Amino acid sequence: MSIHIIKADKIITGKDLTLMTRGAIQIEDGKITRIYNHASQIPSGEHITVTDLGDKTLIPGMIDCHNHLALDTRIEHHLVKMNDCECEQTIRALKTMNDDLHAGVTTARCLGDRFYIDVTCKKAQKEGRISGPKLVVSGIGMRASHGHGYVGMPFDGPEEFRRQARENILHGVDFLKVFMTKVINATSFIYHFMSPEELRAVVQEARSVGITTACHCSGGQGLDDCIDAGIDCLEHVYYISERQVEKVKNADRWVVYTPSYALNDDLLFKFSPKDKDGSLKEKEIICKCLEGAISGGLKFGIGTDGIHQGLAQEAIYISSLGASNQDVLAGITVNAAKLCHVDNVTGSITEGMAADLVALDGNPLEDLSALKRVEAVYQDGKKIN
């Protein structure tokens, strides 16, 4: 068996993201088999190849905790295009997967794609037939017929939601996804579109087969209903209140932050139903709520929500809202892996883990903009060209 050793000036290792200088990692059969504290410890031999990354920083492969394969905000009328045929959406998904991988995302959590595109792509990627991140998938996102969710499909009543939950499970999903609220609300009352009974039906089906649940939820009564029903992860939480931060923390639930929809003006103005001034007001409100969630110590992951190749910028936004660089990096690596239930196979530079790695120009523990300067990507020990 051949051995590949990668040397780097800085390597961020372990579940606690410890910085190691002038070390190296050993890779065999796609896994990290040894970590050398100093390059002088590296063995030599005819079956050993060594790659020296010089002054670069090696981090775990990044994990996008909220992605949609066929939703691509980089293209015009991207929401309308969610009504495209299956072939068009699949073509788009193949491109976004390849783009994300080259940006350093070696694993992505998919929060719903029509036609079970995510499920199909997960299998094809695992078999080596397509290039892209390893996928954690939810299949068909479920929304109420009068509710939000351009990616989701409409259902009404507990039994319809239960039936679709079972259909998703039949297709082999990793978790179930529902939509409760809008994205940007811009009203004093936060609309919520699913009943507690509908939520509980989905949670019951997930728990019956040992998988988790996630809900697109900005805040308001819908957020309380999600917690009470047992939803495991709350996506976005743009309008989460101080009281709800405590409630989420006490319930030991996850949140996933997707801050561009508040901090990126191009997106905010597009999604808010109000004029530009109204959108800026929403931005101020949302930033305050997200700052409260971060200061409240909620366990979190970070996602792009279809802003492909944009995970680094999302991480920078979360830092600007008060999170430390180490916590932000954890939100796209070790903690992200926990959220995705893949922390036993990826998410950290640890012996026995998959060799999913990213080489950066710069140290993200000091400067998160280094996440944008990807020099090399390795997935299961193989360099992505």
Image: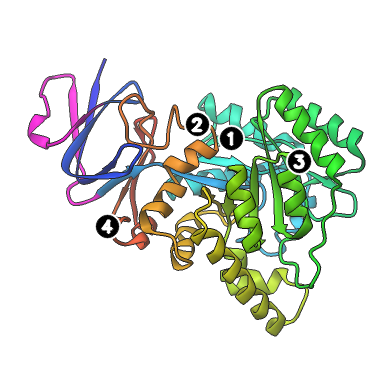
Expressed as whole percent of the image width and height from the top left, the position of residue 231 reads 70, 41
Closer to the chain start, of discs 2 and 4, is 2
Determine whether, in the image, residue 350 is placed left or right of residue 154. Answer: left
Closer to the chain start, of discs 2 and 1, is 1
Residue on which disc 4 sits: 362
The answer to whether residue 55 is magenta is: yes
SS for tag 2? loop
SS for tag 4? loop
Task: Please state which amino acid type lies under the numbered disc 3.
Answer: Ala
Residue on which disc 2 sits: 342
Cα–Cα gap, marks 2 and 1: 9 Å
Cα–Cα gap, marks 2 and 3: 25 Å
Cα–Cα gap, marks 4 and 3: 43 Å
Q: Nearer the viewer, mark 4 or mark 3?
A: 3
- As drawn, the residue found furthest toward the left would be 40
Closer to the chain start, of discs 3 and 1, is 1
Residue depicted at 32% across the width and 35% down the height: 349
Cα–Cα gap, marks 3 and 1: 23 Å
Dots 3 and 1: beta carbons under 8 Å? no
Expressed as whole percent of the image width and height from the top left, the position of residue 273 reads 78, 73
Residue on which disc 3 sits: 229
Cα–Cα gap, marks 2 and 4: 27 Å
Expressed as whole percent of the image width and height from the top left, the position of residue 103 reads 44, 50
